[in-house]
Amino acid sequence: MAGTIHVDVVSAEESIFSGEARFVALPGEAGELGIYPRHTPLITRIRPGAVRIETADGGEEFVFVAGGILEVQPNTVTVLSDTAIRGKDLDDEKANQAKAAAEEALKNAKTDIDIAMAQSELAVMAAQLAALRKYRQKK
């Protein structure tokens, strides 16, 4: 379809989204990225946060990713992430529990590796909660 780009969002477990889009916005490593059809080819890491997809029919899809890799070709956008969750599947209570567990792990960390792992998990959960708030505001 003219004026669209094919988008695939894939987690380690499943394909989360595959379809045509007018626009994709996501958290790049150096800041927010906006991708339109015929974008310059690009490969970059992405930070934990929200992937917003404006679909070809004018709707909007929302996916939380816990970081990953973005590949952009003129007619295709591919988002690869270990963890990707559809906006409608995000759970406030589970995210808050996981954040609390990460905070507790950080308090009890004894080695630099434990601290780094806990900080990473805490950052992902904070990004997930922020993405959840953003998703709920759009609804």
Image (spheres, rainbow, N blue to C red):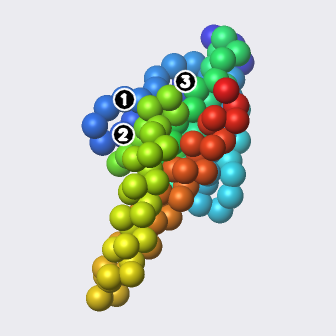
Judge depth for marks 2 and 3 and give the one in front: 2
In what element is the residue under mark 2?
Answer: loop
Of the residues under marks 2 and 3, which one precedes in the sequence? 3
Q: Position of residue 120 (x, y in %)?
A: 43, 68
> What's under tag 1, amino acid-wise?
Ser
Q: CA distance from mark 2 to mark 1?
A: 6 Å
> What's under tag 2, amino acid-wise?
Ser
- Quarter of the image where one finds residue 34: top right
In what element is the residue under mark 3?
Answer: strand
Q: Residue at x 35, y 48 (%)?
A: 82
Where does label 3 land, which residue?
6
Residue 15's tag is 1
Residue 28's tag is none
Q: Is residue 89 visible to us here?
A: yes
> What's under tag 3, amino acid-wise?
His
Q: Position of residue 40 (x, y in %)?
A: 66, 41
The reply to whether the C-beta atoms of the residues labelled 2 and 1 are less than 8 Å apart is yes
Q: CA distance from mark 2 to mark 3?
A: 17 Å
Q: Residue at x 66, y 17 (%)?
A: 59
Choose between 89 and 22: the one closer to the eye.
89
Left or right of 136 in this view: 128? left
Q: Quadrant of the C terminus?
A: top right
Q: Residues within 10 Å of mark 3 (few under 14, many from 20)?
A: many
